[in-house]
Every structure is written in structure tokens, then in C-alpha cells.
Amino acid sequence: MPELKVIKIRKPRDVNLILGQSHFIKTAEDLYEVLITATSGIKFGLAFCESSGACRVRSEGNDEELKKLAQDNALQIGAGHSFIIFLRNAYPINVLNAIKNIPEVCRIFCASANPVEVIVAQTELGQGILGVIDGSSPKGLEASEDIAWRRDFLRKIGYKLSEVQTYGTK
């Protein structure tokens, strides 16, 4: 029977993460190329766990703190062909579709700013990700004040037009 482990992702509160699975050594470079061209001002670090040959953690990034964070978390997870990306000055929504379109990317386990735990199985062969715990469980249905907060928040961070914004000029 495999041994199950819970790995807590360590990251600052202001950092988003993307955890996924891929299948080829060029993943680190392909992720770098997608991220660096995704949106201006993006800061990121990423690490990819190679699962054959030298079995190294390959890493790239344009921010040394986030790159080190990715390396440390990837080593903790230790699952072959997994990758982890940490982002600042961008949200996963800005890069997810581009990442999913990289030919060697197999899946995305989660994209979140929440506390994340990774459920890992250990066998004689190695470790693999079974799933993730992303944030907390729901505490009930949203009420009218929750709806108002959500709508205001999306406009505040620029993902929805405010009621006074219009397209074009008169």
C-alpha cells in the first residue's frame, strides 16, 4: 500500500500558485516563455520535477525569491513530472490558458492564492500527486451582502467594468 503524505505549500499571502503535471524536460523553459510574455510586470518563479535520467528539480524565473520558493516546494512535493509556479503582479487567470496549451502540460491540479495542501502518495517507484486541498470548506450560502462584496471586489481589481465606465467616447 502506498504511504500518503500531506505537503503544505509554503508561500507568502500575496503570492498565487499554479500546481500542475507535465511530461518532458523542456517544461521549465516552455513555462518560462509563456509566463514572461503573458502580461507586463509579471514576477514569477517555477520548478519542474524531472522523473527520469538525473531526476533533478529544474527551475526558471525572473524573480529570485519566487524561484527559490518554487524550488523548495517542488523538493517537498517530490512528485515526478510535477511543476509549481509562484506569481506576483499577475493572477493565474492571466496565464492558465496559455499554460494549458503547452503541448507537454498534462493537467493543472490547482491555481490559487489560498493556503494549499498537496496529497502525495509514496510507493517504491516514487511519489505522485493524488490531489489538493485548496483553502477552506464553505461556511454556507452567500447572502445579498456577500454578493455585493463579490461584485465590488471584481470591479476593484479590474476584472469587471464599473457601472460608470463605458466604451468609446461621445
Image (tube, rainbow, N blue to C red):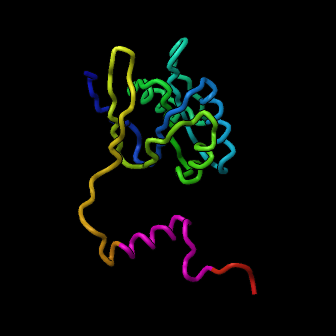
Q: Where's the N terminus, which quadrant?
A: top left
Residue 138 percent coordinates (x, y): 27, 59
Queried whether the magenta region covers residue 151, the answer comes back as yes
**Which residue is farthest top?**
54
Whether 87 is drawn above or below 138: the answer is above
* Quarter where residue 27 is shown: top right
Q: Where's the C terminus, which quadrant?
A: bottom right
Whether 92 is drawn above or below 24: the answer is below
Q: Residue at x 65, y 81 (%)?
A: 166
**Which residue is farthest bottom?**
170
**Which residue is farthest front?**
1
Pick the front one: 66 or 52: 52
Whether 6 is drawn above or below 114: the answer is above
Queried whether the magenta region covers residue 160, the answer comes back as yes
Residue 70 percent coordinates (x, y): 48, 32
Q: Number of marks in the image?
A: 0
Residue 61 percent coordinates (x, y): 60, 34
Q: Residue at x 35, y 42 (%)?
A: 116
Residue range corresponding to the magenta coloring: 147-165
Residue 99 percent coordinates (x, y): 59, 43
Whether 168 is drawn above or below 111: the answer is below
Pick the front one: 153 or 18: 18
Q: Residue at x 64, y 26 (%)?
A: 26
Q: Residue at x 59, y 53 (%)?
A: 94
Pick the front one: 59 or 14: 59
